[in-house]
Amino acid sequence: MKQFVNIVADPIYSFPITCVLYYYMLKYYKFFGSKKFAWTVTLIAIPVFLIMMADPNFYLIITWPDNIPITILIVAVSFFTWYSIHKAAINDTRQEEGEVPVEATPENREKVWCWPNLVYTEMFAIIAGTVFLIVWAIVFKAPLEEPANPTWAPNPAKAPWYFLGLQEMLVYFDPWMAGVVLPGVIVVGLIAIPYIDTNPKGNGYFCFNDRKFAISSFLFGWLVLWLYLIIVGTFLRGPNWTFYGPFEYWDFHKVVAEYNVNLSEFLWIKFLGTAMPSNILVREALGIVLSLGYMFGLPPLLAKTSFFKELISKIGMIRYYITIVLFLLMFSLPIKMVLRWAFSLKYIVALPEWELNL
Amino acid sequence: MSKKGIADYVRETQVWKSIFRHGPPNNARNRAAVVAGNVFLHLHPIKLKKSGVQLGYTWCMGGLSFFVFLALTVTGVLLMFYYRPTAEYAFNDIIALREHVPLGIMREIHRWGAHLMVITVWLHMFRVFMTGSYKPPREFNWGVGVILLVLTLLLSFTGYLLPWDQLAIWAIAVGSNMAKATPFLGHGGPGAALAQIGDFVMVSDKNDVRFQLLAGRFVGEPALLRFYILHCVFIPLVVGVLIAIHFWRVRKDGGISAPL
Ligand code: HEM
């Protein structure tokens, strides 16, 4: 059983599994958002977690002090994802039956006094937050390792957990993409959301039906890409950033034979059977054309499909182009992951001469 | 009103009346006065929609983010009394915090609080997205929020270096190495090699973005000072101003969002 989990946790399997689970979560969101589902999962998850904690390797990685926030994050995000879908399901059902969302009932539109209604809630939150922090601080000591030593790097050297999604992306992209361009795109993309999502519905209440496209795209980026990669980067990456299953001992000598090939090598050596051209632009021509085509050729092509035609009629051309470019950049990550696993593809464009690898 | 309790007696003293200029908040007039007359409470409207005060709607995550930010400010100031940002003292001061300071959990609260703030801010954004609260008229405030999110991460990141242990310098080394790869601005990034005129290299490891960030080519003492000032002074000030804007706009955009 543990062996099995160790194998399936490898991103090659766990990423597609996560995507499939995500798809079914949204497809059957009313079932997912039911209380029955939540109780069942909780009642199963607690004993499973306890059994897993009995494993020494798993125990070690979970209780490492700086990893505790991630366990809290996983629990909190699971709960709040369920909770918002739960509320969305209730409101959707109400709207299907011709009623208004819960937040819009006359009772909830009524104005109440700030004192005591809001002030007491805030006071409760402050007390709960204080108690939580003090208990956490007493139970877990803040970590402190050996004094800084610039000549000896620990292995693995990990960034703080909230950046481990980016560090995990380094497996698939060079630092200029994983550490600079993609984070920049995330920030710009987030700020752009209100300006490209012109759907007036779903403002001020939980729902899913009224804004299916917006919610499923956002949740994909947030749960399946961002959080999934953080979990992999924290719990499943050991020395040399090699994959280790959750119950696997971090053996420094684990060697993974990995031989990745660039697209240009595929083309010239394997496919055409010739030597690599000496002109670097000719050498990488296929990759360059593919990448440029992906970023600049696809958007006008996709604009012709019926799905996007409808979108364009709603949001206009400029918003469409911004949206689609953001989407293509977001999907460049899963595409690169799949290409790596399926074809051991290293770089689509490999121009180490210019430090430009894609 | 036959018997006066001790509370009523206190309320009638000159001292009490000089501080709180209104009676107990059990009628409409005083409830308005208590919120409007207090510098902290007056951030709130006097009356608000019921849907907006429910825990199930806001999850109080924005409020908790603010609370944790305040807790971090207080514990952070306490830590500054003990901590000197030099390669010689930094690590030992952290040890001393653990071993010689009575009831020494300030460092723990500060560290776990920093992690917690990242979590609450993420969850707050998640809630705001799920209720569609970024839609007009709140587009701008969503943008302010995204900047706050980035600054929260940077606050946490700059603080990570200060204990000056192996965990700290290597985590920062990993993070700042990414800056090296910035297109055109980092010496290891695409385009940097183009910025070369004859023998003159415009972007090198002695002037690129990573050098600016670390005040050096590696994580050394100048980086410690730089991160210390960013962490304790510069970023908190910017965050404070942005939070003020954020709260102001929540009010000006019509309070917590509700169905139109
Ligand atoms: C330091 C970080 C932050 C603090 C202290 C903060 C604080 C708050 C508070 C107290 C509220 C009132 C409602 C509530 O509690 O939910 C609020 C509302 C709001 N926040 Fe934030 N926030 C922060 C970060 C963010 C981020 C990252 C975003 C989004 C990207 C954001 C977007 C918004 C929006 C759009 C509202 C209005 C919500 C509504 O009307 O329903 N904030 N914020």
Image: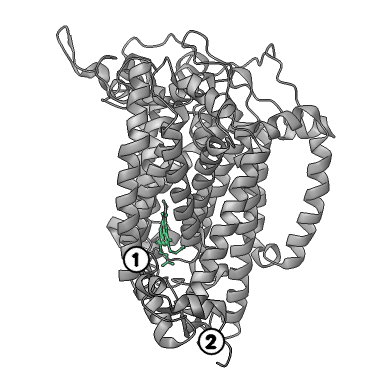
Residue A65 in percent (x, y) is at 63, 33
Name the residue type under label 1: Val
Disc on res. A82: none
Numbered disc total: 2
Instruction: Give the image's coloring scheme.
Output: one colour
Crowd class of label 2 (few under 14; some 14 to 19; many from 20; radius 10 Å): few
Q: Is residue A301 visible?
A: no
- Element at badge 1? loop
Mark-to-mark CA distance, 2 and 1: 30 Å
Q: Observer-nearest residue: B105 or B241?
A: B105
Q: Is A56 located above or below residue A42 in the figure?
A: above
Name the residue type under label 2: Glu
Q: Observer-nearest residue: B120 or A141?
A: A141
Which quarter of the rendered picture does the C terminus of chain B lie within?
bottom left
Q: Which residue is mark 1?
A: B39
Residue B153 in percent (x, y) is at 43, 40
Q: Is residue A231 visible?
A: yes
**Chain identifier of the residue bearing label 1 in the image:** B
Which label lies toward us, 2 or 1?
A: 1
Q: Which residue is mark 2?
A: A107
Residue B87 in percent (x, y) is at 41, 16
Q: Residue at coordinates 36% horizontally, 77% vertically from top-left?
A: B21
Q: Residue at coordinates 32% horizontally, 38% vertically from top-left?
A: B233
Mark 2 vs 1: CB contact within 8 A: no
* Horizontal side, residue B78 vs residue A320: left or right: right
Crowd class of label 1 (few under 14; some 14 to 19; many from 20; radius 10 Å): few
* Horizontal side, residue B88 vs residue A39: left or right: left
**Chain identifier of the residue bearing label 2 in the image:** A
Q: Quadrant of ligand 1?
A: bottom left
Residues marked 2 and 1, same chain: no
